Amino acid sequence: MHDALAAQSALFANIESHSIETLRTFGYQEIRLPILEKTELYTRSIGNHTDIVSKEMYSFEDRNSDSLTLRPEGTAGCVRAVLENGLITTRQRLWYSGPFFRHERPQKGRLRQFHQVGAETFMMAGPDIDCELITISNRIFEKLEIKNLTLKINSLGTSEARRNYGKVLVNWLESRRDKLDDDSCRRLETNPLRILDSKDVNTQKLLEDAPQLSDYTDDASRLHLEQLKSMLDDNGIAYQHDPLLVRGLDYYNKTVFEWVSPGDSGQNSVCAGGRYDGLVALLGGKPTTAAGFALGIERLALLLEDKTDLAHRSDIYVVALGERAESKARILADLLRTQLAAVVLNNCGGGSLKSQLRQADKSGAKVAVILGENEVRDKTATIKDLRGKTEQKVCKESELVSCIQTYFPVE
Ligand code: ATP
Ligand code: MG
């Protein structure tokens, strides 16, 4: 679990604010969910044989001997919340943002505490809402100027279709066990569909000739996918139909999707989602259609890291010499903040002119406002251009805002 220092925090905040702003313009409303839920919520919804439940959850007993789990994902908690709060009486478009926890093998883009922005919708059967969710994610990437992502889509069909197909796949793979990687062998017994998702090259090769899920899905699911495809065509969003795309959570059905970055690191999924029409009923509600997605903030950050300029921490640095100047500095700094919406640093802790100017330089500020005894007496301020070649000048205190403004031309 990592600390995010200034540079990374700024990057995360940038990704989050673009995401949230986009979701708002599509009419999504925020829901703030607890970080802890009962363990049972996840075992029931995500499925016992998934990676998340079988080996990635942080679970513990609290003082009442209730088993609780640090949330590994957002959908289950969101469904619990909409049920408990009686929200599934009308259509819902919701978003959330925050930390999630999975006990994984830590590596680049795979952390034990990571962050997601997620969207969940209820009571819309799609495929128009599936298209909307994909359009939102696409818009977020456009705003962040992330290119080169590939959208993969597939249909998982009904749970019955998956069960039937699962049997066929297991039969087919049983006789080829020796060619499977260890994880996939284990999954033959527990979660055969996840074998399709194996990152092992030999297994992938073997699967090229395996029976395909699409031959077992029902007509309604197939139609849903075809309609979604034509809507995406209309919206100019390119996609790849990937028959091997399955999601790592049991609750998905019908259309699922994933945005992946180039490369084959195993950590290139930046956003994933799909439909989960059975989950609300599974958790005790009436049958309710639902679909959503979650994007991984750290994985998007990896794609953006080169583009951030973080040397710049402030715009204006106020230097003050002596007590009277310091008290004036506090007032003028605040005036500059409110009038110019600039980042203004007050020199706190005294020091010589030279040492204060050194701090000003380090802060990345463009100009320094210097207040000494003379300035206080004459109701003036000295302005020093820290980056350009303009001569140092003295201006009247009453003209300080307009004078400083000339150093920040409107772009
Ligand atoms: P992967 O196949 O990479 O393990 P996943 O299928 O487990 O991903 P989801 O549960 O669908 O991922 O989560 C949605 C998104 O959250 C992923 O696309 C990814 O961007 C991000 N994510 C998932 N797990 C992690 C993690 N351990 N560290 C960082 N980001 C993660
Ligand atoms: Mg995973």
Image (cartoon, rainbow, N blue to C red):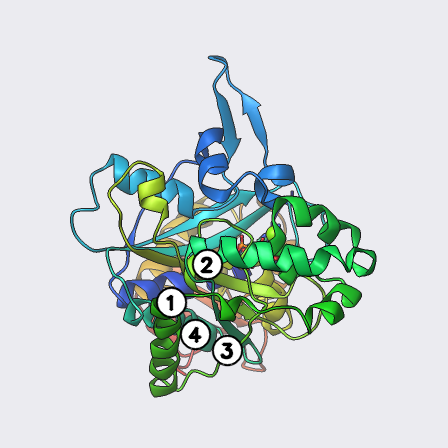
- Residue 327 is situated, as x and y percent measured from the top left of the image, at 41, 45
> Mark 4 packing: few (<14 Cα in 10 Å), some, or many (20+)?
some
The residue at the far right in this view is 178
Q: Residue at 50%, 53% (x, y): give it.
A: 163
Question: Could you tell me if the residues under marks 4 and 2 are in contact, i.e. CB atoms within 8 Å?
Answer: no
Of circles 4 and 2, which is in front?
2
Q: How many marks?
A: 4
Kind of residue sitting beneath label 3: Glu
> Mark 1 packing: few (<14 Cα in 10 Å), some, or many (20+)?
some
Q: Residue at 43%, 52% (x, y): give it.
A: 329
Question: Could you tell me if the residues under marks 2 and 3 are in contact, i.e. CB atoms within 8 Å?
Answer: no
Figure quadrant of the C terminus: bottom left
Kind of residue sitting beneath label 2: Ala
Q: Is residue 312 above or below residue 177?
A: below
- Residue 30 is situated, as x and y percent measured from the top left of the image, at 30, 51
Q: What distance separates the C-alpha of mark 1 from that of mark 2?
A: 10 Å
Q: Which secondary structure, mark 4?
A: helix
Q: Earlier in the sequence, mark 4 or mark 2?
A: 4
| Residue annotated with mark 2 | 161
Q: Which secondary structure, mark 2?
A: helix
Question: Could you tell me if the residues under marks 1 and 4 are in contact, i.e. CB atoms within 8 Å?
Answer: no
Residue 260, visible in the rendered structure = yes
Q: Which secondary structure, mark 3?
A: loop
| Left-right relation of 186 to 5 | right
| Residue annotated with mark 3 | 145
Which labelled disc corresponds to residue 138? 4
Q: Earlier in the sequence, mark 3 or mark 4?
A: 4
Question: Could you tell me if the residues under marks 1 and 2 are in contact, i.e. CB atoms within 8 Å?
Answer: yes
| Left-right relation of 361 to 324 | right
